[in-house]
Image (cartoon, rainbow, N blue to C red):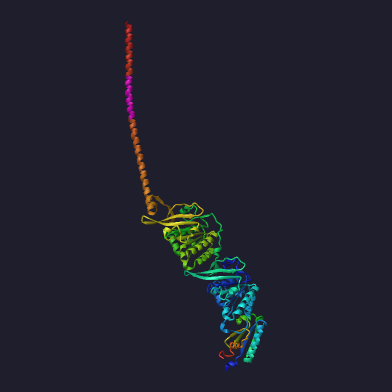
Amino acid sequence: METKEEIWELRLYVAGKTAKSVTALANLKRYCEEHLKGKYIIEVIDLLVQPQLAEGDQILAIPTLVKKVPEPIRKIIGDLSNEEKVLVGLNIRPAKK
Amino acid sequence: MTGIVGLDEITGGGLPKGRPTLICGGTGCGKTLFSIEFIVHGAMLYGEPGVFMSFEEKAEELVLNVASLGYNLNQLQHDKLIRLDHVRIERSEIEETGEYDLDGLFIRLGHAIDSIGAKRVVLDTIENLFSGLLDQGILRAELRRLFEWLKAKKVTTIITGEKGDGTLTRQGLEEYISDCVILLDHRVANQISTRLLRIVKYRGSVHGTNEYPFLIDQSGISVLPVTSLTLTHNVTSERISSGIPSLDKMLEGKGFFRGSSILVSGTAGTGKTSIAASFAHEACNQKERCIYFAFEESPQQIIRNMRSIGFDMQQHIDNGLLRFHASRPTLNGLEMHLVSIHKLIEEFDPQLVILDPITNLITVGTVSEVKSMLIRLIDFLQSMQITVMFTALSLNTIVSEQTDEGVSSLVDAWLLVRDIESNGERNRGMYVMKSRGMKHSNQVREFVITDEGLHLVDVFLSPDGVLTGSAREAQQLQEATGKALRDYAVNRKDREIERKRLVLESKIASLKEEFESVQDELNKAYVEEELRKDVLEKNREQLIKSRHNEQ
């Protein structure tokens, strides 16, 4: 299975250490540990530090999780509190299941 | 200041500085162009850099779209005067889970503003966010926060919004932005579209509340503050010639007042255009500038036709004194005509404007619309001391007292040219219906178009009425004949008297001679009597003497 070889490149855009950002990061880490152990890279970008990066990924909302690889690019906004939706969004669990 | 022609006048100084303004309107009414102009003028004229955040068009598309207006956005971007930012929202890529806010947008916008020190921001069209994001509650709260944040940043912002059903914008954005709301409209009436702008609300400013037409052309948007005009313009008593000496004579011998409005009305083919062209020709001869708005004929046509009556209009065009602007009335709405007339006049700065004919404008508007347009045009021209001549076609001679546009009460001078039909021919009669501020002639003159130009000829008043054309000429001939006859008669009488005098004189001479001969006769008798008496006396003395001697 090729998909198993893939690495999930995830970028989480946050703006400072807000409650939502912290929640989102915690949630994300938990899901990844559960479903993608060892196959993921999480990059946290703080827009307060690097505002010029917002344009590149068309970030509007905070927090936003961007899945660059594997294709297709998906964005998940919010604090990632709904596990089901996040997993579907990340293509980890097929939607039909 | 927006830098948009006319808008600053309506709003009394432009948009509220440091506060957000909502521009709403239907599709294709010019919202994006409006906001682009705001940004570009800000950067180029007022030294205020601006950020254009587009939620609709890509930056490259925007650059292309406004390139036709002569704006080089790339150059401006390079000079760090403008920053274009395209925010793309792809519904299919976005999944929402739980709480979020729009800090990303804030940061992005904040970064863009800070990077060029922007004073102006445009968000075009922010409502697209609503289609991209589902949670309306969050969105509304965030937008409210965004506007507060923009206010706090002291940037002047334009937010555009699509017009919704019954509300100004589809998502009710006007609830958030309460400082200034401008509504753009694109209305089609009688198949003619007119763009209109209305300031719905502007806190803390005296603004015009009417709908103002605006125009999008090669040089961008221009708004016309047409109803802000008052009746306070200066007047001059300077006179200008009409180009027809005999017409000037009817107007106290001096012609029209400068800055007055003149209406020439008449039925078809009475020479209205010729009068107008003659006026223009004369003005150009006096080295004045003139614009001729033709709504019926093409410039070449007019030039050709006028050459036939001795006016060479081409030389004035070549000298840059005369400009023709020919367009069909149906080209655009009335207001557009007004705007384009304004623009041309401000560009060319003429002393004389001719509109030929205004009657054709009726095809694109109602009588009252045409009238109100003409009122505004006349006001505008008079405030600039420009003389204007309208020609109007009256549809039949019976209602010639009233032009169809009802402008007769507006104008300062009104010439009426009418057909006088008699003896199997039509002739042109002209009279001055009114001419404010001068003792104009009340005479009907016959209006003759010749190879050398236009002339007015005194008409003949006869027991049958006014005589014109060949009837007048016949009358003239008849009068000439009559004079000859009279002269002849007088001569004859003179000769008769002379003859009679001679006869009488000769009679007197013969009588005198007769008298002399009678006198001679009488004298002769008398002398004889004397002699006889003497002789008798002598004889008697002789006798007495002799008798005495004898004794």
For the point 57% across and 94% down, the residue is: A1
Which percent across, then down, holds residue B97?
A: 61, 85
Exactly how many numbered labels are in the figure?
0
- Nearer-the-camera pick, B538 or B221: B221
Q: Residue furthest bottom?
A: A1
For the point 32% across and 8% down, the residue is: B546
- Residue B514 sits inside the magenta stretch: yes
The C terminus of chain A: image quadrant: bottom right
Whether residue B227 is visible? yes
- Residue B236 sits inside the magenta stretch: no
Main SS of the magenta segment?
helix
For the point 35% across and 37% down, the residue is: B498
Which percent across, then down, holds residue A2?
A: 58, 93
Tell me the quarter of the picture where residue B211 sits: bottom right
- Which contiguous range is marked in magenta? B511-528
Picture layout, residue B417 above or below residue B329: above
Q: Would residue B105 be found to the left or right of residue B294 on screen?
A: right
Tell me the quarter of the picture where residue B514 sits: top left
Picture layout, residue B199 above or below residue B98: above
Q: Residue furthest right?
A: A17
Picture layout, residue B46 above or below residue B410: below
- Nearer-the-camera pick, B58 or B396: B396
- Nearer-the-camera pick, B110 or B485: B110
Tell me the quarter of the picture where residue B20 sits: bottom right
Whether residue A36 is visible? no
Which percent across, then down, holds residue B214?
A: 53, 68
Which percent across, then down, holds residue A22?
A: 66, 85
